[in-house]
């Protein structure tokens, strides 16, 4: 079973092992190292949450929460609903984005505890 990514080929070998075409070393090999190529390397694998997803959801939640809370109370006729909503949206959206980023940090810290060690193996290039 192989999965195509831009310029990279991953193939699951055995449970916990993944091969990748042309993987990069985390360090440079010593000049005095043996002439054999290193075909396998152990790497850490974890699933981290996307910050952009948390921020976008926080913006949408902040927008609608501000709209609902502003609509619950009568607007001042000299100011108008739209101006009042726009003013409170600055604080509502900024506040929920802050809460979303803190939530993202908590989920990211939790994902760091679930790191798995896998073995990467170099494959030969497939013809295009």
Image (tube, rainbow, N blue to C red):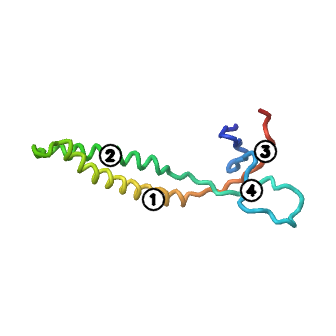
Which quadrant holds the C terminus? Answer: top right
Callouts 1 and 2 close, C-beta under 8 Å: no
Query: Looking at the image, which residue is at 70% across and 41% down?
Result: 7
Residue labelled with disc 3: 123
Judging depth in this view, the residue of 54 and 109 nearest the camera is 54
Q: Secondary structure at mark 2?
A: helix
Callouts 1 and 4 close, C-beta under 8 Å: no
* Mark 1 and mark 4: Cα distance apart in space: 29 Å
Residue labelled with disc 4: 41
Mark found first going from the N terminus, 3 or 2: 2
* Mark 1 and mark 2: Cα distance apart in space: 18 Å
**Which mark is on residue 105?**
1
Judging depth in this view, the residue of 33 and 85 nearest the camera is 85
Mark found first going from the N terminus, 1 or 4: 4
* Mark 3 and mark 4: Cα distance apart in space: 13 Å
**Which mark is on residue 61?**
2
């Amino acid at each position: 079973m192989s999965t195509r990514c831009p310029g990279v080929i991953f193939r699951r070998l055995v449970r916990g092992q993944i091969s990748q075409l042309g993987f990069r070393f985390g360090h440079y090999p010593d000049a005095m190292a043996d002439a054999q190529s290193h075909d396998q390397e152990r790497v850490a694998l974890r699933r981290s949450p996307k910050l952009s997803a948390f921020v976008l959801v926080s913006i949408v939640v902040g927008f609608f929460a501000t709209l609902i809370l502003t609509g619950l109370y009568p607007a001042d006729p000299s100011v108008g609903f739209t101006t009042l909503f726009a003013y409170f949206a600055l604080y509502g959206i900024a506040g929920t984005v802050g809460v979303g980023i803190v939530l993202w940090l908590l989920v990211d810290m939790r994902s760091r505890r679930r790191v798995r060690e896998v073995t990467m193996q170099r494959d030969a290039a497939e013809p295009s």
